[in-house]
Amino acid sequence: MSVSSPHHATLSFIEPLPQSLLPYPPSFAGHQTFALRSSWLKKGVDALLQDPTLFTSDAALVTLGVGKNMVSAIRHWLLATGMAIPISERSSTMLPTALGAFLLTDEGADPYLEDPATLWLLHWKLCGPGSQAYTWAYAFNIWREWEWTRTALSSSIQAAARATTSKVSSANTIDRDVNVFLLTYLAAGERSQNAEDGLDCPLRELGLIRAGFGTQEHYTFAIGPKPSLPPALFAWALLQFWDWQYPGTSTIAARDIAHAEGSPGVVFKLDEDSVLFYLDQFDELTNGQLRFEDTPLVRQVVRTTAQVLIPQDLLQSYYAAQLVA
């Protein structure tokens, strides 16, 4: 994809449907214990546009201006957020995805992650269907405890991974992965003084995880309204969930949008009233292509036309609107 200017940026592609909610085989490494940092995704996209073989070269240290472990971490987060992809299954050569180029090039829609919508998008890529980050997807979809500890989450993840394959990382590796997961989301004021590695992680601004009352070892998800989550981004995520979970159908139940594993309601940690708030806006947002039917007998979203509403069109329209707002 080529982006000539932010006023003419296009997102003319269709992403393949994700195969599963949890990645297989489970992986708990690659980030070198570094949480995502604000500048890394753009830095990586820019570098790959110049040299797709960058991450196989010692020049990466100079080009990216970081140490060897951070080079590996940048590569990991580019892949995990869907901002870059190998050119083939076993290739070490990488290119930015259409979405990565659309967002993060110099003339892209949001190269410096200034719009909260972009942070929600990155969160969805990490935790929604098709995620490559096992701990992230598991914690936000499968793990439904109200208050929990890092140890409890680590143990549950290890048990779930062992149920699918005999080749599972060690408990220490999974525990380190869970620690990076917490650094990704826990707000700065709620972390211990030894948690500098997550201080620059942009996703902590979403406020999705809080320290439990009276202790640093207990945590809760912040379930409820998300004022910084735009309706267009919610609808973008819903269409991906819909096509993954119920491909080819013209209706989807509101309860599934709010409560099913992999749904926007669950991944974004919304309560039911917050989900209904978004559904009520679909008619206007999509020019009638999606309609929310709320009757005593049924609560569902309906695709009203045979014309396919492309999720990427919603992103294109949203970011274009921000340019003139």
Image: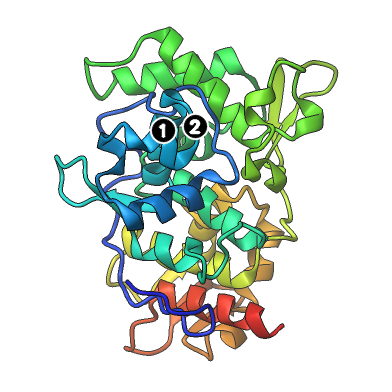
Q: 46 and 9: which one is in front? A: 46
**Figure quadrant of residue 218:** top right
The answer to whether any part of residue 82 appears in the image is no
Mark 2: give few (<14), some (14-19) or many (20+) Cα within 10 Å. few
* Residue 248 position within the rendered picture, expressed as x and y whole percent measured from the top left: 27, 72
Describe the element under mark 2 as helix, strand or loop: loop
**Figure quadrant of residue 241:** bottom left
Going by the numbered disc 1, the residue's amino acid type is Leu
Q: 87 and 12: which one is in front? A: 87
Could you tell me how far apart the alpha carbons at marks 1 and 2 are, in whole angstroms? Answer: 5 Å
Q: Residue furthest right?
A: 214
* Residue 58 position within the rendered picture, expressed as x and y whole percent measured from the top left: 31, 31
State left or right for residue 309 relative to residue 112. Answer: left
State left or right for residue 85 relative to residue 191. Answer: left
Quick check: 21 above or below 25? below
Mark 1: give few (<14), some (14-19) or many (20+) Cα within 10 Å. some
Describe the element under mark 1 as helix, strand or loop: helix
- Quarter holding the N terminus is bottom left
Q: 313 and 148: which one is in front? A: 313
Q: Residue at x 71, y 60 (%)?
A: 228
Q: Residue at x 58, y 39 (%)?
A: 37
Asked if disc 1 and disc 2 are in contact, CB closer than 8 Å, the reply is: yes
* Residue 252 position within the rendered picture, expressed as x and y whole percent measured from the top left: 44, 68
Q: Residue at x 36, y 9 (%)?
A: 170
- Quarter holding the C terminus is bottom right
State left or right for residue 185 relative to residue 315. Answer: right
Going by the numbered disc 2, the residue's amino acid type is Val
The answer to whether any part of residue 276 appears in the image is yes
Instruction: Give the residue pinned by disc 1.
Output: 61
Instruction: Give the residue pinned by disc 2.
Output: 66
Task: Compare marks 1 and 2 and give the one earlier in the sequence.
Answer: 1
Q: 268 and 79: which one is in front? A: 79
